[in-house]
Structures are given as structure tokens and as C-alpha cells.
Image: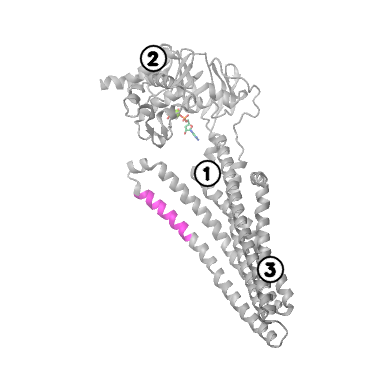
């Protein structure tokens, strides 16, 4: 909750001003009925036109002041609640950016989105309400009670009978409504999660013709939300008739007793008008307070859900890095007895006791069957994951001793599921290097064998990409991602199956360009095809998380059974196809 405190103190002035203005307005609103009573008693009843005029003008002045206060108060409250919530949204977003892969996996993306939108909006609405109604209602309640008692104690006793009864009734209603609202909130979460998944995967859904299935899934979640909302709102509907009934009964009682008091000459007529207004103010403010209770309980749920994100411990940071000023300069990589598992409970590690070393500028191929741990292994170099055991050294220094910024600045990784962002091709390439010139971009694109394609587009490098780069082919996307990585001029370049969708001839050209243009960059190439890494200085063979072979193609072919199996299965297939 310290997040909220920080943001409240950031807008301290407005957080004080808004309720203050509202409070002043509320005091005026409580005084107004008293002035009407005086106008009736001393002006109209006594036929004193001068008094009527004076009092009337004073009331006009007060009303004008109240309007001004109300507008200013509402403005302040609206402004501060918007500033407050947008600050929270910014901080939560920034926090999510710090998340490690494991942190992200522990939240559902849909849920993160809901928290950043719906929950923050809930907080904003609540802040606004608290600054206005949260101040006005108690002020009205107290002020009107005092005024009512000052008019006539015996008549005021009617209020003292009605108010507790009404309070109990409202409490019963709210008690029933609160858990229903909590359920509604979790249903909203569910619908959003489904929505998010269905929207991001709409292509897969279509290609598997699973539209009907997804629709049914969504319909049922939507129906559950609908029922939960109806259920919660049905209860809340009871509130209004209860209120009206209480208000009408009290008015009748007040008019009854008050009338007899007036007829008996024990109360001036104008006081009854004021009294009825005070009764209305008291009951309305009670009703408002109950509404605030409902919103605040929903806001607490939202606040907790937001805090959960902010208070998540980022399990991968550089807080304890010993040599933060150090940058990657050579590009050597060494794994020392590295073991890793994704779930601390699982029995079989994804990597076990992996050790090897790569010299600066070497080209290293990484082979192994699917699921053998290749992606996992390489993700440890830029510290997208940390090993459970053992250590990884870059330039002879433990990766945990670098600042994340410097380490990741020296390592470029083309991820297996490479992603592009909405924006132009040039903007996407600039991810690799913010200030890259058009010539540098063209060169990188040339190396990645995508320059020709881009130049042939009507808008060239200014061509707009859709979200995720869906208006490109798989191979084009891959080559664009390689160009983006090259622009980083990394010391270590990791290509995770990055040419799987590129034909063999183009792939060979990319490989040759990489070798020629980046002789000093260490290149780690994960591939399914042996041909992709056949020329590598060294090939690492991974099997079931264990390093089972290390050497050049020739050496491995001579001595390594796993490698030989992979090689011959592929060569035979090619021969069969030829
Ligand atoms: N985020 C994750 N959470 C949990 N388990 C994971 C995660 N990513 C991968 N795994 C598991 O770890 C193992 C190794 O996966 P990894 O992605 O490293 O394999 P890979 O060799 O790159 O496979 P491929 O050739 O198919 O890309 C697999 O059994 C996989 O199920
Ligand atoms: Mg992989």
C-alpha cells in the first residue's frame, strides 16, 4: 500500500484542497434550510417585505457561493483522482517491465491487463467519490442533526428513532451485497483473461476452426459475469425502496407531530419546512454513506490486486552486482557446472551439470532434439534466466556481476518466437540501436538478406507493420529480427532457431555475411538442421539437458553417437528427397 501513500503525498495540496472545498460547500448547504425558515417566520408570516428582500438576497449570495465551491471542489477532486490513478498506472507498468520471465509467468497476461485498466479505474472512481461524497455525506449528517435538534428536540426524536432502523436495514443489504460484488470482480477477471487469450490467438483459433468452441467458452464466462452482476445489483435494488419508504414515513410523522406543534403555537410554521429538508439531508447522506461502503470494499479488492503486482519480488535483478561499470568487451562465454529447473519441485532438471567454454569470435552451433534445453541454456547468457546451480561467465566475469543493462547491451538474442511491434520497419529496427542511420539499417538488413525485400516495398523502410508483424511472412519476420539484433553490434550474438523459416540458400548467405562482417562477434547458433552449423568452429550437442558432445563436425561425426544419429537421419532424408 506504500504505492498509494507515495502518490497521495505527491499531490498533497489537491488532496487537502478538494475535501476542504467540499466541506465548506456542505456547511453552506446545511445553513440554507435554516435561512428559508427564518424568511418564512420573520418575513412572510410577519409581512415584513424588507426582511424578505434582505434575506432573499443573502440566500442568493450563498447559493452563488455554493455553486462556485461545488464546481471548484469537483474540479479539484476530478483532477487529483485522475493524476493519482495515472501515476499508479505508470508505476505498475514500470514494475511489470522489471519482471523476470518467471515473474511474468506467475501472472496471467489478461489479469495484468485487467489490473492495469479496470482495477486502476476502480481506484480512480473511489478516490473521486471519497473526496466528494465521502466528505459531504458525514458533514450533512452531522450538520443536519445538529440543526434539527436546535429547531425542536421533541420533533428531532422522530429522526433518532428512524435513523438506526434505517441504518440496520442498509447494513443488512450491504452485508448481502459485498460478497456478491467480490464474486462479480473475479468474473470480470475471468472474462478479460478469455478475451485477451482469444484476441491474441485469433489466427490459431481460426485455423483450427475452434471459433465455436471459443465462443461457447466465452459465452459461459460472460453468462457467469452477467449472473453475478445481476445478483449483486438485485440486492442493491432493495436499497432504493427501503430509502424511499423511510423517507416518506418520516416525513409523514414529522408533518403529523410538527403540525400539532404549530397548531398548538409551540413552533413557528417556517421551522417545519426546514425540518423536513433536514430529515431529507440526513436520510440521503445515510444512503450515500452506504454506497461509499460498497465502492470502498470494491476499491480495497482492486487496491490489493494492484499491490500484488507492486509487491512482487523481482527474482532477477542486479542489486548485488559487484562490477556494474563493466561492459562486455571480448565476448567469451563459459558455463561452469550449470543446472536449472523451471519448477523447483520437478524431479528432472531441464539442464544438468553443463560445462563448456567459447572463445571470443568463435561460431558455435547448438544442436539437440526438441525440448532438450537449447533455448533455456542460451537465455541464461543475457540473464533472462538465472541458473539454480553453477555459474556463467562472460569475459571471465560472472554474469551476475554485470549490470543488467551492460550485460544485455553486449548480448543480442534473436528469440525463437521473435516478435515485432506495431510501427514502421525502421522503428522496429531502431530497437537494436536507437540512433542508427538509414545506411546502418540498410547494411544490417543486407546482412540479414532482407534489404532487397524492404526496398521493393512501396514505402520501403517506412512500411507500417501491424501488431506482431503479422503482415510479413515467417521468414521475413525472422530476417528482420536478425537485422534488428545485428544493429546492436553485439559482442555475443545468439540466434535461436532464427532461420528455420528461411530457405537453405538464403540461410547460407546470411551465415556467410555474419562470418565476414562480424568476425569478432561470438555467434551461438541454435539450429534444427545440421547443415546450418556444419561450418561452425565448434558444435555443442545437447540431449535431455545434458551436454553429450562437443567438437567440430568432423570430430563429432567420428566419435559421437548422438550427433551421428542426428546427422545421418537428416542426410538420409535429404537424399531420399533428392
Ligand atoms: N517457461 C517455461 N516454464 C516451464 N517449463 C519450460 C519453460 N520453457 C521451457 N520449458 C521446458 O524446459 C524444457 C526445455 O525447453 P527449451 O525451450 O529449452 O527446449 P529447446 O531445446 O529450445 O526446444 P526446441 O528445439 O523445441 O526449441 C522443455 O521440457 C520445456 O517443456
Ligand atoms: Mg527452443
Residue drawn at x 62%, y 60% is 133
Report the side of 166 relative to 574 (left or right): right
Please say whether residue 225 is one of the residues in the magenta stretch: yes
Disc 2 Cβ-to-ligand 1 distance below 8 Å: no
Mark-to-mark CA distance, 2 and 3? 87 Å
Report the side of 150 relative to 293 (left or right): right
Q: Residue 163: x percent and y percent? A: 66, 72
State the extent of the magenta-drawn residues as a range. Answer: 212-227
Of discs 3 and 1, which sits in the foreground? 3
Of the residues under marks 2 and 3, which one precedes in the sequence?
Answer: 3
Quadrant in which ligand 2 is drawn: top left
Vertical relation: 78 (above or below) 332:
below
Where residue 23 sits, quadrant-wise, is: bottom right
Vertical relation: 534 (above or below) 476:
above
How crowded pointer 2 is (Cα within 10 Å; few <14, some 14-19, many 20+) is rated as: few
Q: Residue 461: x percent and y percent? A: 38, 27
Mark-to-mark CA distance, 3 and 1? 48 Å
Of the residues under marks 2 and 1, which one precedes in the sequence?
Answer: 1
Viewport quadrant of the C terminus: top left
Report the side of 31 relative to 545 (left or right): right
Mark-to-mark CA distance, 2 and 1? 43 Å
Dot 1: element = helix
Residue of label 3: 31
Q: Residue 58: x percent and y percent? A: 67, 68
User: Which residue is nearer to you in this view: 359 or 127?
Assistant: 127
Residue of label 1: 112
Q: Is residue 334 visible?
A: yes
Of discs 2 and 3, which sits in the foreground? 3
Residue drawn at x 46%, y 27% is 430
Residue of label 2: 512
Q: Main secondary structure of the magenta part?
A: helix
How crowded pointer 1 is (Cα within 10 Å; few <14, some 14-19, many 20+) is rated as: many
Amino acid at each position: 500500500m506504500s504505492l498509494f501513500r507515495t502518490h497521495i503525498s505527491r499531490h498533497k495540496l489537491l488532496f487537502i484542497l478538494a475535501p476542504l472545498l467540499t466541506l465548506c460547500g456542505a456547511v453552506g448547504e446545511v445553513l440554507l434550510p435554516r435561512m428559508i425558515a427564518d424568511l418564512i417566520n420573520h418575513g412572510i408570516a410577519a409581512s415584513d417585505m424588507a426582511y424578505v428582500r434582505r434575506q432573499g438576497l443573502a440566500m442568493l449570495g450563498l447559493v452563488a457561493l455554493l455553486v462556485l465551491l461545488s464546481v471548484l471542489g469537483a474540479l479539484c477532486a476530478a483532477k487529483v483522482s485522475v493524476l493519482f490513478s495515472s501515476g499508479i498506472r505508470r508505476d505498475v507498468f514500470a514494475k511489470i517491465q522489471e519482471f523476470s520471465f518467471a515473474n511474468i509467468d506467475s501472472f496471467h497476461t489478461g489479469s495484468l491487463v485487467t489490473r492495469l485498466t479496470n482495477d486502476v479505474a476502480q481506484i480512480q472512481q473511489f478516490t473521486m467519490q471519497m473526496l466528494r461524497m465521502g466528505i459531504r455525506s458525514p458533514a450533512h449528517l452531522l450538520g443536519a442533526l445538529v440543526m434539527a435538534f436546535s429547531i425542536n428536540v421533541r420533533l428531532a426524536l422522530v429522526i433518532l428513532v428512524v435513523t438506526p432502523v434505517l441504518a440496520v436495514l442498509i447494513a443488512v443489504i450491504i452485508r448481502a451485497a459485498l460478497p456478491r460484488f467480490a464474486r462479480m470482480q473475479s468474473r470480470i477477471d475471468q472474462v478479460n483473461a478469455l478475451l485477451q487469450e482469444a484476441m491474441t490467438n485469433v489466427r490459431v483459433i481460426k485455423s483450427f476452426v475452434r471459433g465455436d468452441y471459443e465462443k461457447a467458452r466465452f459465452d459461459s464466462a460472460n453468462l457467469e459475469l452477467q449472473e453475478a452482476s445481476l445478483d449483486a445489483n438485485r440486492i442493491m435494488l432493495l436499497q432504493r425502496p427501503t430509502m424511499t419508504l423511510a423517507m416518506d414515513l418520516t416525513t409523514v410523522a414529522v408533518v403529523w407531530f410538527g403540525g400539532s406543534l404549530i397548531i398548538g403555537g409551540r413552533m413557528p410554521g417556517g421551522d417545519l419546512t426546514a425540518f423536513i429538508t433536514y430529515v431529507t439531508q440526513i436520510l440521503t447522506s445515510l444512503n450515500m454513506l452506504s454506497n461509499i461502503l460498497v465502492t470502498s470494499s470494491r476499491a480495497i479488492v482492486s487496491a490489493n490486486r494492484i499491490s500484488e503486482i507492486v509487491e512482487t519480488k523481482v527474482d532477477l535483478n542486479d542489486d548485488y552486482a559487484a562490477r556494474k561499470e563493466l561492459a562486455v568487451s571480448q565476448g567469451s562465454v563459459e558455463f561452469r557446472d550449470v543446472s536449472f529447473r523451471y519448477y523447483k519441485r520437478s524431479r528432472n532438471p531441464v539442464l544438468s551439470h553443463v560445462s563448456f567454454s567459447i572463445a571470443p569470435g568463435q561460431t558455435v552451433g547448438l544442436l539437440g532434439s526438441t525440448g532438450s534445453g537449447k533455448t533455456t541454456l542460451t537465455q541464461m547468457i543475457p540473464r533472462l534466466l538465472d541458473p539454480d546451480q553453477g555459474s556463467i561467465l562472460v569475459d571471465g566475469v560472472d554474469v551476475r556481476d554485470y549490470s543488467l543493462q551492460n550485460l544485455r547491451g553486449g548480448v543480442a538474442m534473436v528469440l525463437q518466437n521473435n516478435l515485432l511491434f506495431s510501427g514502421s520497419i525502421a522503428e522496429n529496427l531502431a530497437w537494436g540501436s536507437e540512433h542508427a542511420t538509414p545506411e546502418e539499417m540498410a547494411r544490417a538488413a543486407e546482412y540479414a538478406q532482407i534489404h532487397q525485400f524492404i526496398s521493393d516495398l512501396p514505402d520501403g523502410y517506412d512500411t507500417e507493420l501491424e501488431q506482431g508483424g503479422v503482415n510479413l511472412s515467417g521468414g521475413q519476420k525472422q530476417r528482420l529480427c536478425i537485422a534488428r539484433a545485428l544493429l546492436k553490434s553485439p559482442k555475443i550474438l545468439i540466434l535461436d532457431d532464427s532461420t528455420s523459416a528461411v530457405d537453405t540458400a538464403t540461410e547460407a548467405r546470411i551465415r556467410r555475411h555474419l562470418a565476414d562482417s562480424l568476425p569478432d562477434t561470438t555467434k551461438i547458433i541454435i539450429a534444427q538442421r545440421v547443415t546450418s552449423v556444419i561450418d561452425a568452429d565448434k558444435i555443442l550437442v545437447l540431449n535431455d539437458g545434458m551436454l553429450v558432445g562437443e567438437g567440430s563436425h568432423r570430430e563429432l561425426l567420428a566419435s559421437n553417437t548422438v550427433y551421428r544419429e542426428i546427422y545421418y537421419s537428416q542426410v538420409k532424408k535429404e537424399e531420399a528427397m533428392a
